[in-house]
Image (spheres, grey):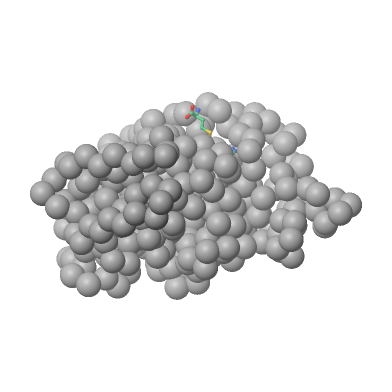
Amino acid sequence: MASTLIDKGPQCGPLSLSGRGWGVVRHCGAMTLAIVAAMHEELRALLPALESARVVHHAGREFHCGRLDGHEVVLVLSRIGKVAAATTAALLVERFDARRVLFTGVAGGLGPAVRVGDVVVARELLQHDMDASPLFPRYEVPLTGRARFATDAPMSDALVAAAREGVSRVLELAGPLHRLADFGIGAPGVHEGLVVSGDRFVATAGEGEILRANLPDAVAVEMEGAAVAQVCHDCDVPFAVLRSISDRADDSAHVDFTRFVEAVASRYTATIVRLWLRRWPAPGASPDADEAL
Ligand code: SAH
């Protein structure tokens, strides 16, 4: 499968090309950090801040290489669901030399205290629709011996810190206050814990309740994180997952979801990602955490 490269700016750091017989490998730069989102709205808020941007078209995706807050990054839309996310993660590691992966997006709240507008940092991920029982225990990914995949602790610790700072500023940063008030968002909470993924948009109270009963420690449900986790685990690449809560995985999930994503989600998680980037050590990182968020 061929890749095409389109210049959007003067340069993209130390771009390197090497043939491997099956295509062209293009690296965005040394120690590339990958930032992945499932939906356009989630990526849109980060793209304008990308410096020295170049786009590599590959496998139906646009990989945006450049510098963001002092980091060599590649930003990409994974598209929705576990297969799309796993494909994207594998391409990032194999073709773009991603050394760390951050997935950012929205999710449905499962934990009793997890409300629309809150932020969740995953500490573990599990595929809630994985079930090869009785051959393997329910949820266990066959031949890995595990159901839960842990995120990178230092990345996640820094994300929690960035999220705490972000939610205190997000009311001013995420646009007109009345929009957040429309969602009943006053002081968003930050949660950490188990995030579960599956190829279903959980949009009925019944489905949400089954997940809550079967996986009582799950804080949120989405459709990509655990797939990225499995790939990153296989490839020994540290990863983290940040989600803002768009709905409560119940009968009104589709309404809440659409309104939330359109109104606030994009700027919301982007703000936290950029605060995180500015905390995360990188050569040449901007020392000014307040600038141009
Ligand atoms: N209407 C959207 C569909 C989005 S699917 C569209 O046409 O683009 C839902 C996305 O948000 C997925 O990326 C998933 O990870 C996340 N998500 C948010 N709430 C969810 C829920 N209740 N159940 C599952 N995934 C959810």
Which residue occupies 22% across, 72% down?
Answer: 283
User: As rendered, which of 271 and 284 lies closer to the eye?
Assistant: 284
User: Residue farthest to the right?
Assistant: 134
Where does residue 97 sit, x and y in percent of width and height?
A: 37, 60
Front-lying residue, 20 or 210 = 20
Residue 60 visible to an observer of this rendering: yes
Name the residue at 54% across, 48% down: 86
On-image quarter of the N terminus: top left
In this rendering, does residue 166 appear at all?
A: no
Q: Is residue 14 above or below residue 266?
A: below
What is the x, y in percent for residue 101? Answer: 43, 59
In percent of the image, x 43 and y 48: which residue is there? 22
Task: Describe residue 54's horizontal placement relative to residue 57 as left or right.
Answer: left
Residue 184 in percent (x, y) is at 46, 38
Q: Which of 243 and 209 is in front in this view?
A: 243
Most extreme residue toward the left is 10
Residue 44 in the image, given as x and y percentages of width and height: 31, 39
Image label count: 0
191 lies left or right of 261: right
Considering every residue shown, the one lying at the far top of the view is 255
Position of 19 relative to 284 (above/below): above
Residue at 63% x, 38% y is 199
Judge left or right: residue 96 versus residue 129: left
